[in-house]
Amino acid sequence: MKKYILFTFYLIPLLLLIGFVANFSVNVPIDDEWRLASLFEKIAQGNVNFQDFWALHSNHRIVFPKIIIAVLVFASQWNINYQLCLSIGLALITFIAMYKLSSMQVKNVGDDLWHLANILTCILVFSLVQHENWLWGFQLAWFFVNLCFVAAVYALVLTHKLLPTIRISIAAIFCFIASFSLAQGLLSWLAMIPAVVAVEGNRVHKKRRLIAWMLLFVATCAIYSIDYHPSRKTSIISLLSKPLVVIDYFLSLLGSPIVRLPVFAAFVGLVIFASFVFFVWHFGQKILSIDLGWGGDGQDAHSTSPLGWGGDGQDAHPTSPLGWGYQALPWLSIGLFSVLSALFITAGRAEFGAIQAIESSRYTTNSILLLIALVQLGQLFVRETTVALKRNYNFFYRGFAGLLIGIIIVNSQQAIAQTRSALLYKQGAQDCLQLINYLEPSEFFKNSPESCLRVLSKKTWLVRDGAAIIDRIGWRKFAKNVEFISNSEKVYGYLDKPKTSQKSFKAAGWAVFPQNKKQPNIVLLSVGDKQSFFANAYVNLDSPDIAKILKSQLYNNARWAVDVSGADWAIAQTDIKAWVYNPVDNQFVQLRGG
């Protein structure tokens, strides 16, 4: 019964994540994904080459994510849900690797403290605070890099049946893959140094391996720099002139998985960073106190034990400084990778201010690794304490775990609320993409914050070019030969008389699909007799009066309104019309009034 209960606790975070993605995912490319459309066209035409994969994406070389995404895109005809499923799969494998790492470290595997630490790890790995990445197919690169690094750590602590050279070679392969998946993947080489040095062997062997590892790192950086011309360069001098801004951003980034408020996030980030520094000092002392385990004759004091473990995979000396220090090494490396990545992100983004670190939930996928490292290091710290103090530390750790779970629940509720409020805009953008052949290249669609095209990408020309490529390949069905119905027998809504001025006008009204459970997401505006549209509005405003008149709660949010600048319409007398698209009958139906 206990096994079933524990399995349920491990399963719940994953099931909640799957339900979250299933309910809030929208099958439409977003932002950076549109920049890959030209690559897909070259693949479809059979004239793709290595340079297409090698080319910079922003400041990153994402060779391996491009390959993975291209495979999924062609297998699914660019169904974004395939990429979202892979992101969940990558996170699941990452958690399994961490679970195995934890089981290798602790002698009393299966006790309550061990399960508590791993359940916390599971909750953090699948945390909804990363909602932006869970719902954005392109962001699978973040989960992929995390997996590569954890796999590299895992490779080094495999049973000593594999030779150290083989284990280090496997770790190097994972670091190389991470390096060409995101720019911060290059930092995996540096974060792995403590674990590489700790691999069993005498002093000469350890030095040779470290030199070889650093040469591999330098070689990878040299390859990375070939034809490297980033579109956006960071001025280090400019950043150094604003140290408080940089520090605020860095700490806010570390604290963002817990608190998403200015100042408070930085304070929590400071506590998290200080805790990690303490664990580095605490466990580092235990390793350095015996010179990384080397004996006076230059031989390793525990040369038969990889990272201090015995042949059965358990710690050979769990109560010795060497044993506890080496048990902590994998988590110290994982925490170090998170810190280095946060510094890298800070260098590139600090100019936007700490609020950007707090609001961009995609960065939390990196910051969460540091929290996971603290959870596991805290477990080891409690285990190594004397019997007299263990009860107090155990109580404190469980209290911390309860507080962390409560915070994650609150953050998850906020993530769900935030995602739900953004869902209509994504669904409207999906409709916009389907109708893109009827959207004029107006100033509204290019620059208005209410433009449904700008939800897909701020560079709307990328969306139009990408849509044309998708149409040529035949992956999506775009609306064509749509019939315009001006006088429908059924009432689809009304357009109030617009309030105009010399520079703008405000269009408003309400819209519904009569006798249809799915209601329209957007209303489109046209001028005169044009069979094309210069603006859109979202159908999302409260309308209890409409629901009362039509006797259905489906129409509780049937109102819409939009402000349009004068640059988008003729100052002369103009006939403004509002329309909704009926996909069932492939018709644009005009709203009454005007």
Image (tube, helix red, strand yellow):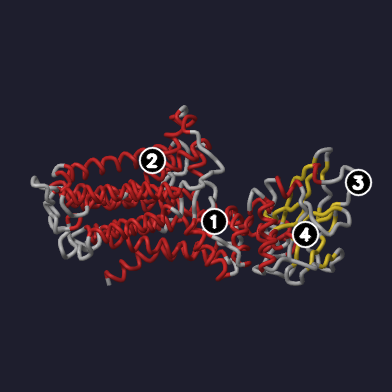
Mark 4 and mark 3 residues within 8 Å of each other at the beta carbon? no
Residue at mark 1 to residue at mark 3: CA–CA distance: 54 Å
**Residue sitting at x 66%, y 58%:** 466
Residue on which disc 3 sits: 573
Residue at mark 4 to residue at mark 2: CA–CA distance: 49 Å
Kind of element beneath mark 1: helix
Out of 574 and 9, give the one closest to the viewer: 574
The mark found on residue 51 in the picture is: 1
Return the disc, 2 or 3, that comes first in the chain's sequence. 2
Mark 4 and mark 2 residues within 8 Å of each other at the beta carbon? no
Question: Where, by quadrant of the figure, is residue 79 drawn?
Answer: bottom right
Return the disc, 4 or 3, that comes first in the chain's sequence. 4
Amino acid found under the numbered disc labelled 4: Tyr
Kind of element beneath mark 4: helix
Relative image position of residue 128 (x, y in whole percent): 46, 56
**Residue sitting at x 78%, y 42%:** 565
Residue at mark 1 to residue at mark 2: CA–CA distance: 43 Å
Residue on which disc 4 sits: 438
Kind of element beneath mark 3: loop
Kind of element beneath mark 2: helix
Residue placed furthest toward the top: 241
Question: Where, by quadrant of the figure, is residue 291 drawn?
Answer: top left
Relative image position of residue 562 (x, y in whole percent): 74, 48
Mark 1 vs mark 3: give the one in front: 1
